[in-house]
Image (cartoon, grey):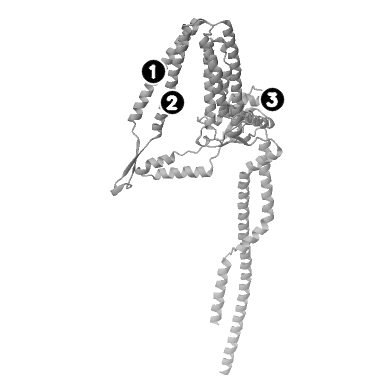
Amino acid sequence: MAKNNRRGLGAALRNQDKKDEAVISGPAIIKQLKRHLAAWLVIAIIAGLLTFCYSAYKTFSARTPVSALVSFTYTGIEKGLDPKGRKFEIESMKNTKVVENALKEVGLGTDKIEDIRTGISFDYKIPQSAYDQLTAHSSVMDQASNGSLSAAQAMLDTKYYPTQFTVKLDLGKAGLSRQEGADFLNALLKKYGEHFYEEYGYNEPLGTAVTSLEYKDYDYAQQVDLFRNSLKTVKNYLDSLAKDDNTTFRSSVTGYTFNDLSDYAKTITSIDLDRISSYVSVNNVTKDKDSALAYYNYRIENLNRDKDEYTERLAALDTSIAQYQKDVIQVFGNGTDNTNTESTLHSEQYDSLFKQKTSVEASLAQTKQDIDYYISRRDALQNNKNSSKANVDKVEADIAALSNKVNDLVDLTKKTASDYYENVQFANAYNILVPAANSVGAGIKQAVNDSIKTIVIVEFFILAVYLAAAFIGAVKAACGRKAAKAGADDDDDDDFEEIVDAVKEKAEKAKKAVNNKKNKKK
């Protein structure tokens, strides 16, 4: 009987320990997730729509900036340079001339130019590959030892220059509606393209300077010199274009190549101009003999000064080249008998000295030729009488015809160069990748892009609340089961005690009965 009591007591204690535990299982949490799934979906969808609507409201409001994306893909932009080798400035897009032309294009007044220029801004993004490279170079620099410091510094000097820019227009600062802002920004991008080709394409000032010559204000010999200089300038420009052209470009507008036009300039100089020059010299054609002689003497004097300067520069360059210490490269263990070999290399500075010398020599030779030319013209004019009126009329007619040929050459040069720059050299130099837009579709797209980050944050927060609610629900359910089980166990304990009391009572009765029998026997 005692053993049975002990077993019952042990079972009761074990049941009591189990009653004190509240088990939260995975299935219980999943059950709670399913229970709240519909509510979570509804709340998540409503929150996402509200966030998007708020972003759309900001996008379509009058104060929201409009933007466009442009890119540059010419040689040098990767180093932050413009086509002329100078530092590239995207800010030139909002210079006064371009903004004014854009305003006129869309029919807006020019009284708010400064407000609009203030509202224009630019942004760019460094690609991840370039960022990783710059970060790696910085790490090498930090870890460099004294022996490799120069190499590490050279790596660190690597920089990234953007080639794509986002152009933004703040409508609030500009004082424009969204439609006006989009139209203006697109006009600005277009006018900047025209400005880009004018700035870096055909040399407009060169053509203007050549064609605007008032040659009739000068004496005939001076007129010849003016046209000679103009033809030399145009020919040098054409030769430089031909040198840079790797495609043997032939213009579809004029049908000429740069070499064709250069030969044309050479022909005009060697045939037309030289013929007029010799006729003027032989026949002493002049408006004023004394003025012409003074002009020749002045030219000879200036040219002699130039000759002396070129001579001194040439001597200095020869001395610098002779004394220049060439770079020495030592190759270890490359010689015989374990000896080292050395090699000398010409550096960029050394090559530059030779280029300067060649240029000075050419200038000196040309100056000497010019001196001889003016001396011969001066001597011929001094020793002869003035020419007749017939000679003067012939020279004037020939020079007028020469002027027409020069103007025609300049016009052909302009058309050919413009065709080359726009369709070959700068065919993709400036591109409008994404124009400014004010359509409903574009506005919705921008609203989606602007709201994505906010929507992700809001949805993540709602998801966290949803998971927390499921966990709390599982905890409450476990606690409820614990309380219910505890109540059921208490009832079982009461029944057990009643049974035990009944057994004890019967045992007492049985014991009394046994004792009574024993007493009777006695």
Give the amino acid type for the residue marked by disc 3 in the picture.
Gly
Q: Quadrant of the C terminus?
A: bottom right
Quadrant of the image occupied by residue 480 = bottom right
Percent across and percent down for residue 421 are 59, 31
Mark 3 and mark 1 residues within 8 Å of each other at the beta carbon: no
- Nearer the camera: disc 2 or disc 3: 2
Quarter holding the N terminus is bottom right
Up-down relation of residue 518 to residue 277 (above or below): below
- Binning the other alpha carbons within 10 Å of mark 1 as few (below 14), some (14 to 19) or many (20 upward) gives few
52 or 208, nearer to the observer = 208
Graded by Cα atoms within 10 Å as few (under 14), some (14 to 19) or many (20 or more), the crowding at tag 3 reads few
Q: Name the residue type under label 1.
A: Asp
Q: Position of residue 451 (x, y in %)?
A: 64, 43
Secondary structure under tag 1 reads: helix
Instruction: Tell me the residue that label 1 is attached to.
Output: 308
In front here: 221 or 253? 221
In this figure, which residue is indicated by the disc labeled 3? 107
Furthest residue in direction bottom, as rendered = 521
Pick whichever of labels 3 and 1 is earlier in the sequence.
3
Which residue is denoted by mark 2 in the rendering?
359
